[in-house]
Image (spheres, helix red, strand yellow):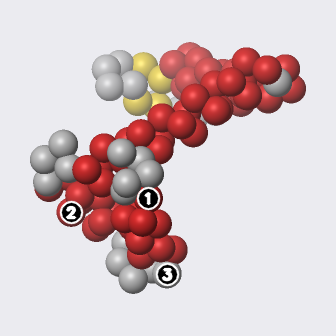
Amino acid sequence: MLLEQWDEILRFVGTMKVKETTASDLFRCLNSYSKQHTLYRALKTFGHIYKSLFILLYLDDVALRQAIEKQLNKSKSAHKFTRAISVGNPRELLEADKQE
């Protein structure tokens, strides 16, 4: 199926590349069709290939894993800090003067 739709995939990507229309407009149009649309399924399959390659690379490359873990720790620390200094629900930051 992927090979059958390859020309359509290239046309789809080419349209985005030359900025003839926005990617969001193209995907909105594509999503208006049935989920069984052949181009939709082909793009989904193409995405699975890249996802699988990334997972294999992630499992194989220690430096990549460490870099990703480092970035994840930064965001966890930021969320932890925000929780620590905010109160209420939803979490809001309170303004205080010097004495408080």
- Give the position of the N terminus as an image quadrant: top left
Foreground tag (1 vs 3): 1
**Residue found 79% across the figure and 20% down from its top:** 60
Q: Position of residue 50 (x, y in %)?
A: 57, 39
Which of pointers 2 and 1 lies earlier in the amino acid sequence?
1
Find disc 2 in the rendering and name its residue.
Answer: 29
- Labels 1 and 3: the sequence-earlier one: 1
Residue pointed to by mark 3: 18
Q: Residue at x 41, y 39 (%)?
A: 45
What type is the residue that disc 2 sits on?
Answer: Cys
Query: Could one spot residue 74 in this view of the protein?
Result: no
Mark pair 3, 2: CA separation: 18 Å
Along the line of sight, the residue nearer the viewer: 6 or 12: 6
Q: Secondary structure at mark 3?
A: loop
The residue that label 1 is drawn on is 6
Q: Is residue 76 visible?
A: yes
18 vs 36: above or below = below
Callout 1, which amino acid?
Answer: Trp
Proximity of marks 1 and 3: CB atoms separated by less than 8 Å: no
- Which image quarter is the C terminus in? top right
- Secondary structure under badge 1? helix
Horizontal side, residue 27 vs residue 68: left or right = left
Taking 37 as reference, is 61 left or right? Answer: right
How packed mark 1 is, by other alpha carbons closer than 10 Å (few <14, some 14-19, many 20 or more), is: some
- Classify 61 as above or below 41: above
The answer to which of 90 and 25 lies nearer the viewer is 25
Residue 65 pos. (x, y %): 77, 22
Left or right placement of residue 67 versus residue 82 in this view: right
In the displayed structure, 47 sits above or below 29; it is above
Residue 51 against residue 81 in the figure, above or below:
below
